[in-house]
Image: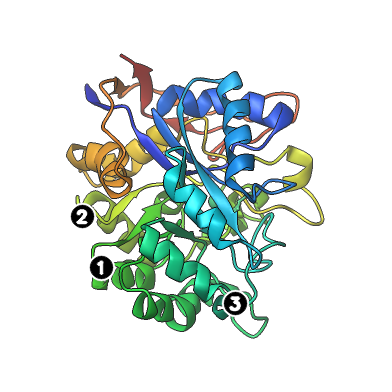
Amino acid sequence: MSIQISKPFDAHLHLRRGKMAELVTPMSAAQFADVIVMPNLNPPILTVAEANSYRNYLLEIAKCNYHMAVYLTENTSIEEIDAAAKDDNIIGFKLYPLNATTGSQNGISDIKNIYPILKRMEIQKVPLLIHGEVTRPDVDIFDREKVFIEEVLTQIVTDFPKLRITLEHITSADAVEFVMSCSENVVATITAHHLLMNRNAIFTVNEKTALNPHNFCLPVAKTERDRNVLLRAAVSGNSKFFAGSDSAPHPLNCKESSCGCAGCFTGLHAVELYAKAFAELERLGNLEEFLSINGRIHYGISIPSEFINIYDTTFLIPDSIGEEKLTPFMAGQNLNWKVLEE
Ligand code: DOR
Ligand code: ZN
């Protein structure tokens, strides 16, 4: 059996620089015709000009339509928003709360500090992409998304009702409910790994109870109930929900470390992982909406004329890849789907 769909769109992807970029960029370009590239590099992508030079760098590595997200800081200027609005290569600005995740040390400490910028983005119709977690030490890490929605996002959507918002990599039933309750300009991406694991996976290795750094990402995976609500939202065909893999490669020594980085690397096989999640609910018929249509409609990206075929054939996920021993999500396990380009 095989299914054919328009070549997918990954609305949230980390491609890094240097050797890592050379390793992972062709993998995503093989599965996706369009990708949104995240700006949390070291140093970060803070301007439209920097985003364009990073885009040219990626184009040298692999052919793909790279749509660039610029890092929003408390020093981002109104002129930068206006420049982004005029530049087709720029998809929007990424809001990282300060210290919420990898590379967020230039993030926002108080949302009120960027209110003039958000107003300009609303007027200019420039999308805001949000990592939705608070970082206060009194908030439980599993409640960070829920509290962000209650304390920050609700305020943003009330004060900027026309602002185009993507709540990235949602992990909770609270997030699904919130996005569904908002107007059509508020949408969400869902990763493959959050559709396939609950928080037990962070504490399971080969069916034994042990710490598994390869399943540690941010926002952290939540409960089985949350996973089921995410899955239902993803397969529903509701145009507010679409794929953003958040594939986040880190070298092995940064994952298996006393200070392990957050991130699941799904770039090798993101489409196949999504197919696995949809197949489990027997909803492969809605995979194309989620992978190729909904996100493009939100961002005004045209549907490509290329297709991919997804076959139900067994594929062993390698233990690690390349010099940096990059460990793919579900390493060493079989996957029952394989993508072949038309
Ligand atoms: O797990 C994550 N890894 N979440 C993020 O928000 C950032 C990402 C990364 O860049 O490694
Ligand atoms: Zn990310």
Disc 3 marks a residue whose amino acid type is Asn
Of the residues tagged 1 and 3, which is closer to the observer? 3
The foreground one among 251 and 336 is: 251
Q: Which label was assigned to residue 113?
A: 3
Spot occupied by residue 166 in the image (x, y as percentages of width and height): 39, 58
How far is the residue under mark 3 from the one under mark 2? 34 Å
Q: CA distance from mark 1 to mark 3?
A: 28 Å
Residue under numbered circle 2: 238
Residue 202 placed where, x, y %? 59, 57
Amino acid on which disc 2 is placed: Asn
User: Where on the picture, by quarter, is residue 86?
Assistant: top left
Circle 1 Cα neighbour tier, 10 Å, few/some/many (<14 / 14–19 / ≥20): some
Coordinates of residue 143 in the picture (x, y in percent): 51, 76
Which quadrant is the N terminus positioned in? Answer: top left
Quadrant that contains the C terminus: top left
Residue ID for mark 1: 180
Q: Is residue 289 above or below residue 152?
A: above
Q: Are marks 1 and 3 in contact (CB under 8 Å)?
A: no
Q: Considering the numbered disc 2 on the image, is that residue within a helix, a strand or a loop?
A: loop
Residue beneath the point at 25% across and 21% down: 305
Sequence-wise, the earlier of marks 1 and 3 is: 3
Q: Are the residues flagged by discs 1 and 2 in contact, CB closer than 8 Å? A: yes
Is 231 or 75 nearer to us in this picture?
Answer: 75
Residue at the location (24% across, 49% down)?
235
Q: Residue at x 39, y 53 (%)?
A: 189
| Camera sees residue 320 | no
Residue type highlighted by circle 1: Met
N-terminal of the pair, mark 3 or mark 2, is: 3
